[in-house]
Amino acid sequence: MLSGIQPTADSFHLGNYLGALRQWVAMQETHDTFYCIVDLHAITVEHDPELLRARTRVSAAQLLALGIDPERSTLFVQSQVPEHPQLSWVMECMAGFGEASRMTQFKDKSARQALDRVSVGLFTYPILQAADILLYQANFVPVGEDQRQHLELTRDLAQRFNGRFGQTFTLPEAYIVKDTAKIYDLQDPTAKMSKSVPAGVVELLEEPKKAAKKIRSAVTDTGREIVYDTENKPGVSNLLTIYSALTGKTVAELEAAYEGKGYGDLKKELGEVLVEFITPVQAKVKSYLDDTAELDKVLARGAERAREVAADTLKQVYDRVGF
Ligand code: ADP
Ligand code: NA
């Protein structure tokens, strides 16, 4: 199983955790897991070098603090494994220009800009992503809807290569992750929680008191009853989803517990639950960041382990294409 996350924020948010990273931790129990901080993908758009370096470390620290165990998972930084861009070049030569041009994510991201301001890297990004997956002969890739087309491209490229040069790559399958929660913006519960609107986003590394206050200020609907109803009560439903995901209590249990109580009680208590969750995570993150030499060592060991697998795949690929 392979999954990656971009080091493009100073903190992961609650949506990243409840929608993805929590499952990364759980999947360590059942799969041979490779988790990659995809910094090569982070430079497809303009970036600041020092900020990228800091965010790569803070991303790693958060993954460790949330429970990624570097003994059980291969946790590494993409740029430390040169086989990624090496395989990517070969796969670029497998991909049709038209085929790559049909990627809807690129079309969306480039739509509002002059094409000379959009990097070629942003265009070939899905092919690098294919290389990320194929290097490790991953059987499974957890994917959300927005990544389905990229996984299809990965499979097409792998199949094409296998067909032309002989069986080399495992065809990865989309892994439908159980218990993922889609988390909505606290200020606009019809939009997904994302980095764009600060007041609606809970960051894992923000001041706990501030985080609790954001929950208390979350938009709820008129009415009083605390019931899960995404149609008529998206705000309350979102809070129940978060509450349930953080405590393991079912939504039905929460509805029963809050019968006759008001939104204020729900928000206050969820704020406390959130504070209890993020406070120890933040302490762990801080201790990892207090010793960056040790953190860098953990990542270097991860990269070494990743390279053992990646180099093996690349060697076969190079041999088959005639290098
Ligand atoms: P963002 O959408 O904030 O830019 P990313 O696209 O970097 O975040 O997402 C990283 C991971 O977190 C992905 O697996 C994505 O599906 C998940 N994720 C992001 N936002 C949410 C959300 N609001 N609810 C559930 N999962 C989310
Ligand atoms: Na995304």
Image (cartoon, helix red, strand yellow):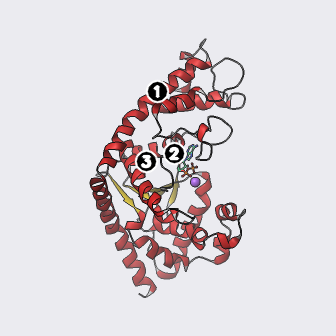
Q: Residue 313 — which label?
A: none
Q: CA distance from mark 3 to mark 1?
A: 22 Å
Which mark sits nearer the N-terminus, 2 or 3?
A: 2
Residue drawn 59% across the image and 41% down it: 198
Q: Residue 273 — which label?
A: 1
- Looking at the rendered structure, the kind of residue marked 3 is Trp
Contact between marks 2 and 1 (CB within 8 A): the answer is no
Q: Residue 16 — which label?
A: 2
Residue drawn 54% across the image and 32% down it: 242
Task: From this view, report whether residue 37 is shown above or below residue 65.
Answer: below
- Looking at the rendered structure, the kind of residue marked 2 is Asn
Helix, strand or loop at label 3? It is helix
Q: CA distance from mark 2 to mark 3?
A: 11 Å
Can residue 139 be seen at all in this image of the molecule? no
Can residue 302 be seen at all in this image of the molecule? yes
Mark 1, Cα crowd under 10 Å, few <14 / some 14-19 / many 20+, is some
Front in this rendered view, residue 181 or 298: 298
- The picture places residue 306, in percent across and down from the top left corner, at 35, 64
Which quarter shows the N terminus?
bottom left
Residue drawn 49% across the image and 74% down it: 88
Left or right, 264 with respect to 98, comes to left
Task: From this view, report whether residue 117 is shown above or below residue 9.
Answer: below
- The picture places residue 247, in percent across and down from the top left corner, at 46, 28
Task: From this view, report whether residue 48 is shown above or below residue 95.
Answer: above
- The picture places residue 131, in percent across and down from the top left corner, at 48, 69
Q: Which residue is mark 3?
A: 24
Locate residue 76: give its quadrant.
Answer: bottom left
